[in-house]
């Protein structure tokens, strides 16, 4: 009998624009069952790019000096 | 030299020992040594405050008040300084979210360099930035906090659980729910 196996090739986003993300399983300690939702690949690509940009942000220049100066005013 | 905030953090035991040595100096009267702790932790804490409030000015204000509060209560630190000061900042962010209607805030107040290659890219990315922040603002603070810590701060679930005193499973669920909610709020605009 011919078996149909799931392809191991990475999916081309242009062909399969959505991905199914499983909810955290019960083995993590949360017993509540949440159905998987289908991720919108283009949306999450945009969000991931934005969060990656935010991950490089730093406190404003001179911040530590301003805090130390603020200690004197209190 | 300030620690590179994008580099891997020190192992908790090492950084805790270093922090405690600085705390001892500050408590002995070396007030300026507190600047070492500010330099060490201000970048990740700023990202947290910015992610939670969507405003550079508010994030800086919350951070400044938090560090001043930390300085005046430094003798009360029990355990890790980084976790203690994180809780001060996180509570400051939650209080701000509770008390302030933020719809009047403008993104123009963010004076961070954009980091985008071209003005067109900046325009396109500016749209997702506004959309994402608007959607984050619609989330309950616990979901926003989990999403920001995971996806903006890049923390592990174990680190998040340690800082928030909850379980990895609960945090995975919060991040999952945040992603679901964000997608519901935004997918029409990106379909």
Image (cartoon, coloured by chain):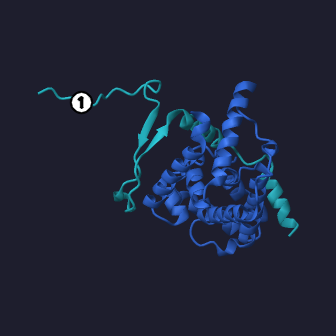
Residue closest to the far front: B188
**Is A43 located above or below residue A31 in the figure?**
above
Q: Colour of chain A?
A: cyan
**Crowding near pointer 1: few (<14 within 10 Å), some, many (20+)?**
few
Residue tagged 1: A5
Name which residue lies at 86% across and 70% down.
A74
Expressed as whole percent of the image width and height from the top left, the position of residue B162 reads 51, 62
Question: Residue lying furthest bottom in this view?
Answer: B76
Q: Where is residue A28 in the image (x, y as percent from the top left)?
A: 38, 58
Q: Is residue B49 above or below residue B79?
A: above
Residue at coordinates 74% horizontally, 54% vertically from top-left? B59
Judge left or right: residue A5 versus residue B181.
left
**In which quadrant of the rendered view does residue A19 lie?**
top left
The residue positioned 36% from the left and 54% from the top of the image is A25
Front residue of this view, candidates A15 and B38: A15
> Looking at the image, which residue sits at the far right?
A73
Which chain has been coloured blue in this picture? B
Name the residue at the left extreme: A1
Chain name for mark 1: A
Judge left or right: residue A6 versus residue B93.
left
Instruction: Give how far across and how far down residue A44 sits, in percent.
Output: 54, 38
User: Looking at the image, is B81 positioned above or below residue B54?
Assistant: below
**Eyeballing the image, is A32 above or below A22?**
below
Question: What kind of element bears circle 1?
Answer: loop
Q: Is residue B118 or residue B184 the one in the foreground? A: B184
In the image, taking residue B184 as reference, residue A13 lies left or right, namely: left
Residue B178 placed where, x, y %?
54, 52
Q: Nearer the viewer, residue B93 or A2?
A: A2
């Amino acid at each position: 009998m011919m078996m149909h196996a799931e392809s191991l090739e990475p999916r081309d986003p242009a062909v399969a624009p959505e991905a199914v993300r499983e909810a955290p399983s019960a083995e993590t300690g949360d017993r509540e069952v949440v159905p998987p939702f289908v991720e919108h690949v283009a949306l999450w690509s945009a969000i991931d790019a934005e969060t990656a940009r935010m991950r490089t942000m730093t406190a404003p220049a001179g911040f530590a000096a301003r805090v130390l100066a603020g200690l004197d005013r209190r | 030299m300030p620690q590179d905030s994008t580099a891997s953090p020190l192992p908790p035991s090492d950084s805790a020992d270093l922090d405690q040595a600085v705390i001892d100096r500050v408590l002995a009267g070396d007030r300026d040594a507190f600047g070492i702790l500010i330099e060490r932790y201000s970048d990740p804490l700023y990202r947290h405050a910015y992610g939670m409030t969507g405003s550079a000015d508010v994030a800086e204000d919350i951070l400044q008040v938090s560090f001043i509060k930390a300085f005046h209560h430094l003798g009360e630190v029990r355990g890790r300084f980084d976790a203690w000061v994180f809780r001060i900042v996180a509570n400051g962010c939650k209080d701000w979210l509770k008390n302030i209607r933020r719809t009047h805030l403008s993104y123009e107040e963010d004076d961070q360099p954009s980091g985008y290659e071209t003005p067109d890219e900046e325009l396109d990315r500016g749209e997702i930035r506004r959309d994402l922040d608007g959607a984050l603002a619609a989330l309950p603070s616990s979901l926003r906090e989990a999403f920001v810590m995971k996806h903006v701060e890049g923390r592990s679930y174990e680190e998040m659980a340690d800082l928030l005193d909850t379980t990895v499973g609960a945090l995975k669920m919060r991040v999952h729910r945040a992603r679901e909610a964000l997608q519901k709020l935004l997918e029409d605009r990106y379909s």
